[in-house]
Amino acid sequence: MRFRDLVRLSLDSAVRARMRSIMLLLAMSIGVAAVIALTSLGEGARRYVADEFQALGTRMIIVIPGRSETGGVSPGMLSGETPRDLTLSDALAVQRLPGVQRVAPLVIGSAPASVGALEREAPVMGSSSELMPVHGFVLARGDFLPPGDLSRDTAVAVIGNNIARELFPGREAIGGNLRIGDRRFRVIGVLADQGRMIGMDSQELIIVPVSAAQALFNTESLFRLLIQAHTRDDMTRVRDATIEVIKLRHQGEEDVTVITQDALLSTFDRIFTALTLTLAGIASISLAVAGVLIMNVMLVSVSQRTSEVGLLKAIGATRRQITALFLTEAILLSVAGAIAGLAVGYGVDWIVGNIYPSLPLNPPVWAVVMALVVAILSGVIFGLMPARRAARLDPVAALAGRR
Amino acid sequence: MIDLQNICRHFQMGDQEVRALDQIDVRIESGEYVSIMGPSGSGKSTLLNVLGLLDRPTAGTYILDGRETTSLDDEELAHTRARKIGFIFQSFHLIPRLTAFENVELPLVLAGVAPEVRRPRVQELLASLSLESRARHRPNELSGGQRQRVAIARAMVMQPAVLLADEPTGNLDHISGAEVLAAIEGLNAKGITLLVVTHDAEVAQRARRHIRMRDGRVVEDAT
Ligand SMILES: Nc1ncnc2c1ncn2[C@@H]1O[C@H](COP(=O)(O)OP(=O)(O)O)[C@@H](O)[C@H]1O
Ligand SMILES: [Mg+2]
């Protein structure tokens, strides 16, 4: 039998048995679409987080007070528990290490900010002039924090765009006076609407000199120390030296956690890759279910077409040809289902992508390949048993419609 | 051309053995026209199935065209069936989703014959059976007589040496039955060996040789 004839005959049979074929197509396409959509989601989440980290700036090393047990990301680090203070003089010591280009101390809190009768609660970040290049902040207008002695408590503030709009409605914020807590600040700059730092929207932020923030929140300790190395190659050296110098300053106790952006990123990467794999696994269960369905439907089809098989044998069809006919039909159906599933999966991605433009939805290539391979394989594997059953039918009994 | 020696076909029904064919010895020469009659259950269909290589005898020797067939494997049987044997059944056995043309074409498709060779051959056969206008119709759009003629075309398309017809007119009215018989007798006139199983004495009478069966045995073989 010629390949084209084989496909034509099988296709014909599939098209004629419309309900059966639609059912199989549906089952298979749901399976494939589920794999595509779910892995896109996992992959999208991973990329979203990766982008957020990228926004933190490169060559970044973060010092967090408190020792994490595992060296990885621990809950303590993320919530910022403070077993032993990290201080401004620690920051100055780190600043002098070789390979260190910039150091930006961070104090973070929340305080009521007001201008006249207008008041709102706002996140306040105390840092230095170095924060702008380290973090990659962009100014809409005005100036950033002035460089100089970290311990000098200048009463200036750089504010986010939303804060400027809300507290200085209809007028220029720069030059204006702002009350934060019980202290007065002069606004010297407004941040551009750009970027977010995990959990922090630059539009909603107020940045003041670090010592002003320390006075405001009545604390000596830093929330974070952000270090920028000169080059990527300096990262490891700077990290080790930082741990060393802080240990020395803290009575020989290693009571800080130092993480590089790479390490953080790869941790999240691992978590999200595992998540994506899990989703793919769950979704491929539906592919297996579709395969079992294929098998059952094809078995029914074989028994409905028993006398047809008998006739085929009477006109000289071999076992192999009958196997090929039924198997091809199962494979065609699963391939068609897989293609339909791809279309549906990408369609879902497209729709979700339009609703949430910030979530980049694209299925990973391996997931697409896996979905197609599993779909077609299940067509082969689950189609084989019914096809062979058809091929083994006794011709005389089959012609009489008996099995 | 057909040589059955001591052919037996037994079926085991529980602990009872049914002898559907019991020591059959028959020789049929090329180009003969043979009718097979006998009461229901006498083994006529079983004989035809054995002759058509659809069924294997329990014992005995079957030589077709000088070749011993009982030792052939399934694959070889299928190929021999495809090339040498044409079947016609009482219930036509056309594939309902295929057109008349496609039904007739099917044996050629299975044999891997190229489409450009198949088409003229099928068209010619359909024309010779006055079916050219029905080529694009599916079986459910054809009359019984037309269906059986499509089945004849399908049986003939591989140009077999033997045509085996199991009650070919059993489901047809008198006129259609006569047309069908005329068609297969025309083929016999051109040299094909024709075996017709029938209940109808009038139909049987038209053959040149008459075999009568009872209880799996040949009880009469007359020319
Ligand atoms: N597959 C089978 N299993 C058991 N008995 C069978 C089978 N096929 C035929 N027979 C028996 O063999 C005998 C001959 O059957 P058959 O050749 O169909 O008779 P006919 O065609 O002359 O009516 C009958 O008794 C029938 O019941
Ligand atoms: Mg019979």
Image (cartoon, rainbow, N blue to C red):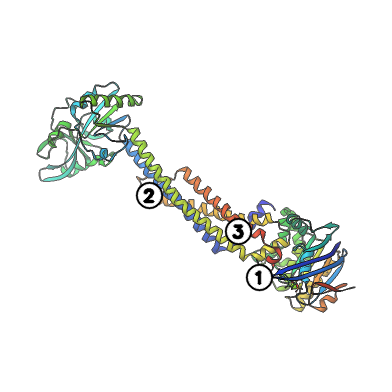
The residue type indicated by label 1 comes to Asn
Marks 1 and 2 close (CB-CB < 8 Å):
no
* Residue located beneath label 3 in the image: A386
Q: Residue at x 47, y 51 (%)?
A: A284
Instruction: Please identify, in this view, whether the residue under mark 3 or under mark 1 is nearer the observer.
Output: 3
Query: Are labels 3 and 2 assigned to the same chain?
Result: yes
In-image side of A371 versus B191 (left or right) = left
Q: Secondary structure at mark 3?
A: helix
Q: Is residue A304 above or below residue A351?
A: below
Q: Secondary structure at mark 2?
A: helix
The residue type indicated by label 3 comes to Pro
Q: CA distance from mark 3 to mark 1?
A: 28 Å
Q: CA distance from mark 1 to mark 2?
A: 51 Å
Q: Callout 2: residue from which chain?
A: A
Q: Mark 1 CB in 8 Å range of ligand 2?
A: no
Marks 3 and 1 close (CB-CB < 8 Å):
no
Quarter of the figure with residue B73: bottom right
Of residues B124 and A152, the one nearer the viewer is A152
Q: Quadrant of the C terminus of chain B?
A: bottom right
Q: Residue at x 50, y 54 (%)?
A: A288
* Residue located beneath label 1 in the image: B140
Of residues A159 and A52, the one nearer the viewer is A52
* Residue located beneath label 2 in the image: A354
Q: Is residue A279 above or below residue A156?
A: below
- Work out whether mark 3 precedes mark 2 in sequence or the reverse, and give the earlier one: 2
